[in-house]
Image: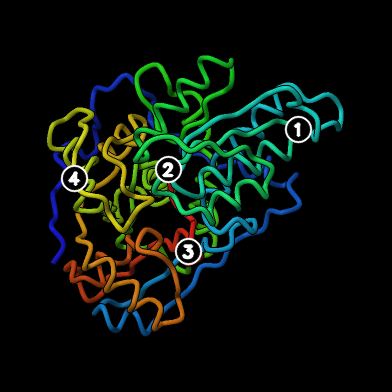
Amino acid sequence: MPVTVSNPHRGQGLSLDAPFPCEDAGAVTRLLQRCPAHQETPLLSVPALAAFCGVAKIHLKDERNRMGLGSFKALGAAHAIARAAQEVVEGDSWTTALKGRTFVTASAGNHGLSVAAGAALFGAQAVIYLSETVPEGFAARLRAKGAEVVRAGADYEASMVAAETAAEENGWTLLSDSSWPGYTELPYRVMEGYLQMAAEVAQQIPEPPTHILLQAGVGGLAAAVAAHARRVWGDAPQIIVVEPEAAPALVESIKAGAVVETKGPVSAMGRLDCKTPSMIALQGLARDADLFVTLTEAEAAAAVATLEAEGLATTPSGGAGIAALIAGLALPQDARVFAILSEGPEEGTGDA
């Protein structure tokens, strides 16, 4: 049974030196209309899974093939890079708008693919730092997108430090999906891109959900979707944030009322295995989320098997939100649940 913690800051948030997440997807949608690879992803109704979980309805936003990149992350870094191109483009010269710029990041998965794809679209270079634990198959996918791949460190945190150092030494633009004091502008744009998912759901879903389950690593996806959900549906839905038991960065920060760095073993929910939350995401979720839930490795693995049996193949990271319900999170029988399949099952994809 997942462990739950109620949010004492609901409706107010925390006194952090960070903006709240953007709530309006309008600017994102207008920019995406220029992108030939963009198309709406489906919202799936899964009555058999709802019956299995003992609730009235489950709708899953299927991000497993967003823009051909395999996850919702296609909307994030690429959107931030497109915004940078929009500021300097002359005429229709979008493909060369950022020539001479280099974007650098650390990644355990799909964020790196989004940086690589976005940089290539607008004539920039991408350098992606990977830890030693990231599969070589994913490194090959990055190189195929034109990115330079650098191995650094034993874990994601170490590769992030290496990326920050490279940005400072080379005059490159650091493009992280996390945020911290003094670094909020670009992560804000990354999170803004994720609003497109929520905006699509608001148009696709037949009636407002009563419960929204959102997986979280640093928290960008969860905070963006939660902010838009509150804008569209107000206080009615209960918003539940799901983290690995091994990386409870948001729940521990909520308890402390401040950003907390956590420690723990490596999680099979690898792209959610983030030990420190994004400051912007924490700011937003402290205001918008009702409940925080931690998920064990066994619960995540069992849920992936259940989803695959329903024809919904994903990873422990990609299915972590709905996994909390599959694992026994108690919801009313008349609950109408919305969750996200955030990535496909391909080896080497990820959430950070």
Q: CA distance from mark 4 to mark 2?
A: 26 Å
Left or right: 170 in relation to 202: right
Please rate how many residues cluster around mark 2, counting C-alpha atoms within 10 Å: few if below 14, some from 14 to 19, many from 20: many
For the residue marked with disc 4, what is the amino acid?
Gly
Question: Which residue does the image show at 35% across and 75% down from the upper left?
Answer: 57
Q: Quadrant of the C terminus?
A: top left
Q: Are marks 3 and 1 in contact (CB under 8 Å)?
A: no
For the residue marked with disc 1, what is the amino acid?
Gly
Which numbered disc flags the more N-terminal residue, 3 or 4?
Answer: 3
Q: Name the one closer to the observer, 117 or 243.
A: 117
For the residue marked with disc 3, what is the amino acid?
Lys
Q: Which residue is mark 1?
A: 123
Q: Which residue is mark 4?
A: 264
Q: Name the one closer to the observer, 70 or 156.
A: 156
| Mark 2 secondary-structure assignment | helix
Q: CA distance from mark 3 to mark 4?
A: 30 Å
Q: Which residue is mark 3?
A: 61
Q: Is residue 111 visible?
A: yes
Question: Which residue does the image show at 13% across and 49% down from the upper left?
Answer: 5
Please rate how many residues cluster around mark 1, counting C-alpha atoms within 10 Å: few if below 14, some from 14 to 19, many from 20: some
Q: Quadrant of the N terminus?
A: bottom left
Discs 1/4, front: 4
Discs 4/2, front: 4
Q: CA distance from mark 2 to mark 3?
A: 15 Å
| Mark 3 secondary-structure assignment | strand
Q: Are marks 1 and 2 in contact (CB under 8 Å)?
A: no
Residue 102 horizontal/vertical position (percent): 64, 26
Q: Are marks 2 and 3 in contact (CB under 8 Å)?
A: no
Q: CA distance from mark 3 to mark 1?
A: 31 Å
